[in-house]
Image (spheres, rainbow, N blue to C red):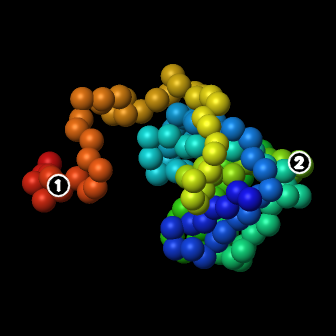
Amino acid sequence: MIEGSCLCGAVRFRSERMSGIVVCHCSMCRKAAGGATGAFFVALRKEVTWTGEEYLASYKSSPELVRTFCSRCGTAMTGANLVEPDETIILAANALDGGIGARVVAHEHAGSKASWADNDDAPHFDGPYPGWESLRP
């Protein structure tokens, strides 16, 4: 079973199956996900169950597309789905819980990649960044 939830736990989804993950670099997906990319997968709508659906808010990001997020904490819960839904639903991979055996199958809109996201020279830490207190503009 595939499970996901928002940051505050008010909204949860379960799905029987999922596709591979597509990472999107477009500015709309970056802003919706609050990061360098948005990451999404496809499930069959009839196989997805929701808990806390009353906390889902929606935003029409394009004339034919709508995204949903938790109205309490802002976590993106779906990607850009059709306003007139079909049999599939695009769910946000950032909301996945646990060790899901999924893989990234593609990167899209790579030409729109955030210019600041390519700094591979930055150090990596297993815990929090120890320099937060020294950061000043």
Closest to the observer: 49 or 28? 49
On screen, residue 42 versus residue 69, left or right, reads: right
Whether residue 94 is visible to the viewer of this picture, yes or no, is yes
Crowding around mark 2 (Cα neighbors within 10 Å: few <14, some 14 to 19, many 20+) is few
Is residue 61 positioned above or below 20 on the image?
A: below
Is residue 46 positioned above or below 104 on the image?
A: below
Residue 7: mark = none
Closest to the observer: 49 or 66? 49
Residue 83, given in percent of the width and then of the height, sits at: 80, 51
- Element type at mark 1: loop
The residue identified by callout 1 is 130
Q: Does label 1 or label 2 sit earlier along the sequence? A: 2
Q: Amino acid at mark 2?
A: Asp
Real-space Cα separation, disc 1 to disc 2, in angstroms: 47 Å
Q: Name, please, the residue furthest toward the top.
A: 111
Viewer-side label of 1, 2: 1
Is residue 1 positioned above or below 121 on the image?
A: below
Q: Amino acid at mark 1?
A: Pro
Disc tally is 2
On screen, residue 87 versus residue 37, left or right, reads: right
Closest to the observer: 19 or 59? 19
Residue 86: mark = 2
Residue positioned 60% across, 76% down in the render: 10
Residue 70, given in percent of the width and then of the height, sits at: 60, 68
| Quadrant of residue 119 within the rendered picture | top left
Residue positioned 60% across, 56% down in the render: 96
Residue positioned 69% across, 38% down in the render: 20
